[in-house]
Each structure stands twice: as structure tokens, then as C-alpha cells.
Image (tube, rainbow, N blue to C red):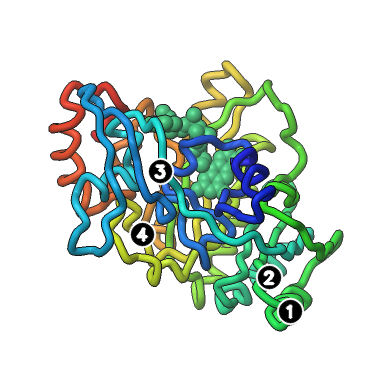
Amino acid sequence: MGELSSFLKKHKRSFPIGLSGKTGMGYILTGGISPLSRSNGLAIDQILEIKGFWGNGKEFHLFRPNTKLESNFEWKALCGAAIFLGIITSVKLKTQPLRKLLSWTANLSFSQLSECINQAESWPNSLSFQWICGEDIFAHAIGEIKNSADESILINLLERLPFSRNRVINKFSDMNSLPNLSLGNNKNNNSNHSEVLGLLGPAWQENNPQVLKILKELMNKRPNKNCYIASQQLGGLTHLNDLDTSFIHRDAIWKPWINGAWEAYDQSKRKRALEWMKECWNNLEFICPGVHLAQIHPHLEWHEKELSSAFKDWLPKLKEIKAIHDPRNIMPPLK
Ligand SMILES: Cc1cc2nc3c(=O)[nH]c(=O)nc-3n(C[C@H](O)[C@H](O)[C@H](O)COP(=O)(O)OP(=O)(O)OC[C@H]3O[C@@H](n4cnc5c(N)ncnc54)[C@H](O)[C@@H]3O)c2cc1C
């Protein structure tokens, strides 16, 4: 995605890449939630054509339908669930004009995080808030500047955010130049292994204090210092729902993800980290009932639950489509 972003920059265009330039095609195929998705849509919303081979070896080449009426199940399945069905060999993507980005980064306390989330829930779509909570809390707000009037509105909103230290407000030319959302303690950390579970849910609103209390408790219990919970902000995606896709949680406002880490090859620590992840999921499920399958876990006992939370009522039809196009389960399983 970083290469895509740098290439497009030369042509004054951009693509809603995610928080890291290091991700590949899987970012686009699994939804692709960008800090710019609130205004520009998900990565799957930019797909115009898609080519590849179904699991049964048959080639396909599909074009984006013009309306919901023209939309078909195969298009819907490939936009968000392609990794279960076949190998994608090429996509044609819509791009957007390149615009300057505003970036606000800072370290926060729990109560400041709570206030920032509160404020972000009433922001315009051109601004999004992401945070990571482990040993410390680091937050990153990203805004797209459409014009100079817009810029002062966004700066005003950013200046209202509380912080404890290291606040920096800066302008960047493209997504790939933005600072990383990281706690800086896991650089090149090959001695740890990890799993990531992405959740999706509505605005916290009046549940904000309760969710923050749960978060604090979960952090205190984390079995390894590289375990963390982070989140990105979506919301406002429902107006971009002009075609059916397999990303069914269009009304989600937050995508918190749980990162469980343990010392590599230590099975008992792995077990503890996975148990902590499950505890996080159980405790947060009331406010995050959905799952974003950016990472899949066919090797874990919760795979069936993550599939049903990701696709809900659409899952049975998706299974039928898989039975036709990938009957021998060459691709990852949908059960
Ligand atoms: C540092 C970091 C930051 C991230 N930030 C974001 C973010 O901001 N927003 C977001 O939505 N997600 C984010 N993710 C999640 C990321 O988008 C997913 O993990 C994604 O699946 C990664 O895709 P990949 O191609 O890089 O990885 P891979 O592990 O190579 O692929 C992931 C999955 O996609 C399948 N796949 C890859 N290419 C194809 C293909 N051509 N055809 C069929 N299947 C294929 C693979 O088999 C695998 O199951 C982030 C991940 C990381 C590590």
C-alpha cells in the first residue's frame, strides 16, 4: 500500500490506504479501513474491476455493477470475502485527488482518551481518531484538508483535544508519510509472536465511562507488555453503501483491535495471551458486536464465532457461493 500511495502521489492522486504502508493486497480484499474511510469509503468501495481464479481453478473477471439492482452475489462475495473464495490476480481501483493531511499525535491518560473519544464521535467525516493503549496511550487524529476554510475548522477541533504530553500538530503530503500508530516498544521484535482480533461496533456515547473502565481493567491484566488494544474510527460509511459488499457492518463507528503477544515458542504463554484476548472480546462484545476479518484464525477455536460475527445473516449464502466456486476448500475455510 505504501508503494501504491507513493506511485499515486507522483500523479497527484491518492488511495485510502490503512495505518501502515507495509500491508499488501490482503488490506484491500478484507475491507481496507483507512483513516480516510469516513469520507472516502473502504478500500473495497474503490474496486472497479476484479480478476482472478476461483478455488476450483476457473478464471473470473467481474466489473463493478452500477446499482444495487444490478449487483450480484459474486461481486458482493468478492468485496470483503475474496480471501475465502479464490486468488485475486488484479484489481482496477478508483483513486482520489491528493490532498494535504493534518495530523495530531499525543500521549494521553485514560480520562483524556475518554474525552477524545467523546469529541471524535461528533467530528465531521474528514477527521478520524485512532489510538493504541498498552504501556502508554498514544493517539493519532488524521484529517483531510479539502480547502482553507476546512483547514481552520479541523485545526480548531484538534486544538480542543486534551493530552498529557508530546502533542504535535503537523501537515503531511500523503498517507504513507504519516507517523505510525505504535507504542514504539515492539520494533523488529522477532522474539514475540502475536494474534490480532478486529472488532466493530457503534459509538460509545453514554457507555464511554463503562468501556474505559473495562479497558483499564483489561490492560492491568495483560499477560505480556506487548499485548495492547487499539482502535480506528470509521462511521459515516452508510452513505457509501451504494452496492452490497461482504463488509456488512456499515454502521460501525469504531474498530478496536486486540493484540495478544507472547514470547515466541512458549506454548503456555501463548495460551495465556489467547485467553486474555478471549476475555477482552467477551468484555467488549456488548459495545463491539461485529468482527472485522482483517486477520483470520482458522487454526483457533474461535474461528466459527469470528465468521458469524463478521458476516451474520450473509454467512449462509457466502457458504453456498464457496461450495460452488471452491468446493474442495482450497482457500481458507468458512466454517
Ligand atoms: C502494521 C499493520 C497495520 C494495519 N493497518 C490496517 C488498517 O489501517 N486498516 C485495515 O483495515 N487493516 C489494517 N491492517 C490489517 C491488514 O490489512 C490485514 O492483516 C491484511 O489481511 C494484510 O494483508 P497482506 O496482503 O499484507 O497480508 P497477507 O498475510 O499476505 O494476506 C492476508 C490474507 O489475505 C490473503 N490474500 C493476500 N493476497 C491475496 C490475493 N491476491 N488473493 C487472495 N487472497 C489473498 C492471504 O492468503 C491471507 O489470508 C494492518 C495490519 C498491519 C500488520
- Residue 264: x and y in percent read 61, 20
Point 73% across, 27% down: residue: 188
Q: Residues within 10 Å of mark 2 (few under 14, many from 20)?
A: many
CB-based contact (under 8 Å), mark 1 and mark 2: yes
How much space separates mark 1 and mark 3, taking CA atoms?
37 Å
CB-based contact (under 8 Å), mark 3 and mark 2: no
Q: Residues within 10 Å of mark 4 (few under 14, many from 20)?
A: many
Residue 145 numbered mark, or none: 2
> Disc 3 residue type?
Leu
Among the two numbered marks 1 and 3 on one chain, the one whose residue lies closer to the N terminus: 1
Question: Disc 1 or disc 3, which is closer to the eye?
Answer: 1
Q: Is residue 87 left or right of residue 276?
A: left
How much space separates mark 4 and mark 2, taking CA atoms?
27 Å
For label 1, being within 8 Å of ligand 1 is answered no
Among the two numbered marks 1 and 4 on one chain, the one whose residue lies closer to the N terminus: 1
Residue named by callout 1: 148
Residue named by callout 3: 293
> Disc 2 residue type?
Ile
Question: Disc 4 or disc 2, which is closer to the eye?
Answer: 2
Point 35% across, 53% down: residue: 247
For label 4, being within 8 Å of ligand 1 is answered no
Among the two numbered marks 4 and 2 on one chain, the one whose residue lies closer to the N terminus: 2
